[in-house]
Image: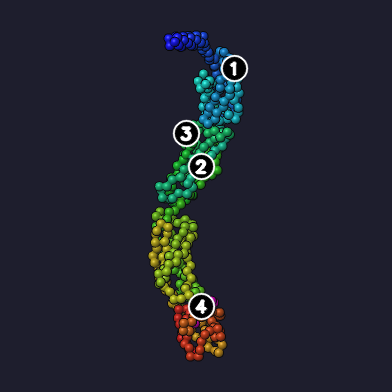
Amino acid sequence: MWIRIIIIITTSVLLCSCHNRSLHHSTPEIWNEIVMPKYSLLLNNENYIAGDIVTLNINQDGPDIIKSKLIIENGPQVYSEVLPASEDHSIVLPESFTQHSGNYKIGIYYNNETLVSDSFNINSQDSDHLYVLTGPRSINADGNDASMIVSIPSDKYDNVVHEGTPIYYESLSKANKENMSVVPIKDQVSYNIILSDTKASSHFIGVTDLKNSSLEQRIDFIPMWPSEITISNEDYYPYANNKNFVDIKTNQLLDSNQNTISEGTFIRYILIDNFEKKSIYNSLVIDGVARVRIKNPAQPKSYSVYAESSNSIKSNIIKLRFKPDITSIPYTLSDSTLVVGPLISQLGQLISEGTEVTLIIGNNIYKEESYKGEAIFQLKLIEHRAGDKFIIKTAGIKQTGKF
């Protein structure tokens, strides 16, 4: 029995093996080989001018069984078209595509394989306008600083004109110094470097390519910071009246090349009183001089004043001392009022309106402002008794009295 089973299994395995071998040999291998066509590109020119009509003729020699792709590139510009399966084909490139100058590369591709390639050039037209960039427009009149003018002549399609085109720069200064230079286009630009002079002035530059001209360019050679500062005072009334002003001004401010400092330059005046309190007054240079007006204080004080520029050049220090503007404080006492005044200044005038007058009674302090040289205290509003002592203070001096 066991022998029969083994024979049956062996027979089955052999049958299956023969069957599989029969199936394998009954399937034939088929290879399909694609025959590529041959292309040729025909252009009526190798060089064109921007805006020209460019016609591309494509001849195909071979089977019409595939569709190839035409790609034309000029930098970031790309034109593509799927070619029909025919013997020849003619393409007129869009005008908007051929308005840009440069080298155009042509290729016909199939499955990333290059079948044919060629190229042609499109040159710019004649100059139609001139782009001019200038900067910086203000440079130091120190003989070392520099500015630059960059010129880009372009055709009507904004293509830069061909290399070697001469650009003419003519400059004229306030001192009537003339200068002419010619700088050809190189790497699509022309530039002219303007070096500063030690004399502060304005330079005017004209740029042309003999067909187009730019607007007039201006470069200012500006003075540097002042080399030294000296200050002095005018109209100094040395009394603390809170009315008059002291005028302080600098000398004629010049830089190291003897140029008058530019209009509007900031000069700071630093004022320090006898209590070490600091005040800052900003001044602007006008006609080479920076001025400031300081109001007389209401109380006797001493000031130290100096000027300083932004490049840390400091002036001499001047002292201002303000004495009391009045020498006495008269007053009149009645049942209802305490009238302080008339308060007379050193010039024989009534003191300034609004001058503060202080009345001190024990620990109580009362204040009034002067009007027409007098300060009036209403006694009904003041805590006091007969025999109380008081102190009157104003303009830096004091007077004692008793109710």
- Amino acid carrying mark 1 in the image: Ala
* Residue under label 4: 356
Residue sitting farthest toward the bottom: 386
The mark found on residue 187 in the picture is 3
Q: Taking 350 as reference, is 313 above or below it?
A: above
Magenta part of the chain: 352-359
CB-based contact (under 8 Å), mark 2 and mark 3: no
The answer to which of 195 and 304 lies nearer the viewer is 304
Q: CA distance from mark 4 to mark 1?
A: 106 Å
The answer to which of 379 and 370 lies nearer the viewer is 379
- Say which residue appears at 43% left-offset and 11% top-offset: 2
The answer to which of 15 and 120 lies nearer the viewer is 15
Closer to viewer: mark 4 or mark 3: 4
- Residue 155 quadrant: top right
CB-based contact (under 8 Å), mark 2 and mark 4: no
- Amino acid carrying mark 4 in the image: Glu
- Say which residue appears at 58% left-offset and 34% top-offset: 156
- Amino acid carrying mark 3 in the image: Asp
